[in-house]
Image: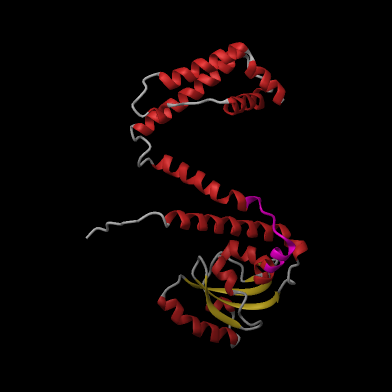
């Protein structure tokens, strides 16, 4: 493939077109500062143009097609540099974000290619095994007391006392489109129906007694945990991909933070706050 590209680039007509494009770019409308107006398409740049064409069309471009690629590349550079000269890139949110994205990619490119050792991954797993554990499975009863309000919170203690004394749940709570009993519900299932706050709170109450209130997206509840199955501590073999993904995400974030801190140290930032 490389030999084919070189053959295309060595054709006499191609050399003529390249020379014409470069001469046009260098000498047309030359300003006092010639450095900013010099556009050079060397062999490496031309090879990349041909390679991209081959990747798209699965053949080398003809001399006429290469002329179009060269002319379009020169046009890109002319428009880009003229836009910069006129300051069109300043205070443009789209340009700013694209440049920020490129700088972040440069800052994190090395971190993205690093490979974690088993020691690194095991240490990360040991720091927070609960994060990688499978869902806790809980069977529980719940009674909805009403929307979250000071009055409902004040009434919760009395509701818990009556329920633990043997009162029927229907006589204490209010009707809502939820079952009174959840059988072997996983943490993710509970989160989907009642919210993350409710699911997290189910980890703490003792079994066999009514407690609360516990908040959900619907309001306040009192609950009685019937049974709770806590999963075994995960092993690296079973959760390797999740741990490795988190490890790499952490490496990339730290690399970006370090690169930004180094760049920021070279700037003096002044913020004029409204008085």
Q: Which residues are magenta?
A: 112-123
Residue 236 vs residue 260: left or right? right
Residue 63 against residue 193 in the figure, above or below: above
Most common secondary structure along the magenta stretch: helix
Q: Quadrant of the C terminus?
A: bottom left
Q: Is residue 118 magenta?
A: yes
Q: Position of residue 215 (x, y in %)?
A: 51, 72
Q: Which quarter of the figure is the N terminus placed in?
A: top right
Judge left or right: residue 132 versus residue 84. right
Q: Is residue 51 visible?
A: yes
Between 269 and 243, the one nearer to me in the picture: 269
Image quarter of residue 25? top left
Q: Residue at x 57, y 81 (%)?
A: 211
**Is residue 185 visible to the viewer in this orientation of the structure?**
no
Among all residues in the image, which is located at the extreme left?
A: 275
Residue nearest the observer in this picture, 171 or 207: 207
Q: Give coordinates of residue 243: x percent, y percent.
A: 68, 61
Find residue 28 and report its horizontal and vertical position in percent: 39, 18
Q: Is residue 97 magenta?
A: no
Residue nearest the viewer, comparing 73 with 15: 15
Looking at the rendered structure, the number of numbered marks drawn on it comes to: 0
The residue depicted at 42 percent of the width and 43 percent of the height is 96
User: What residue is at 48 percent from the left and 72 percent from the top?
Assistant: 146
């Amino acid at each position: 493939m490389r030999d084919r590209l070189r053959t295309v680039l060595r054709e006499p007509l191609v050399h003529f077109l390249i020379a014409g494009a470069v001469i046009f770019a260098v000498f047309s409308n030359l300003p006092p500062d010639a450095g900013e107006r010099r556009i050079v398409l060397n062999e490496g740049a031309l090879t990349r143009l041909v390679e991209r064409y081959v990747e798209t069309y699965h053949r080398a471009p003809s001399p006429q097609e290469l002329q179009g690629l060269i002319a379009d590349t020169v046009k890109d550079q002319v428009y880009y540099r003229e836009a910069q000269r006129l300051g069109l890139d300043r205070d443009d949110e789209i340009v700013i974000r694209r440049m920020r994205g490129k700088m972040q990619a440069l800052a994190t490119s090395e971190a993205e290619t690093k490979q974690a050792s088993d020691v690194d991954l095991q240490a990360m797993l040991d720091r927070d095994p609960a994060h990688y554990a499978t869902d806790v499975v809980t069977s529980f009863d719940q009674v909805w007391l009403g929307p979250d309000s000071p009055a409902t919170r004040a009434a919760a203690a009395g509701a818990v006392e009556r329920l633990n004394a043997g009162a029927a749940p229907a006589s204490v709570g209010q009707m809502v489109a939820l079952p009174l009993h959840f059988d072997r519900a996983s943490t993710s299932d509970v989160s989907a129906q009642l919210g993350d706050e409710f699911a997290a709170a189910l980890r703490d109450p003792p079994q066999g007694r009514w407690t609360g209130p516990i908040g959900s997206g619907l309001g306040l509840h009192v609950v009685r945990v019937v049974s709770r199955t806590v999963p075994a501590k995960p092993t690296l073999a079973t959760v390797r991909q999740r741990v490795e993904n988190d490890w790499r995400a952490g490496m990339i974030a730290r690399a970006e933070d370090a690169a930004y801190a180094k760049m920021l140290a070279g700037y003096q930032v002044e913020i004029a706050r409204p008085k």
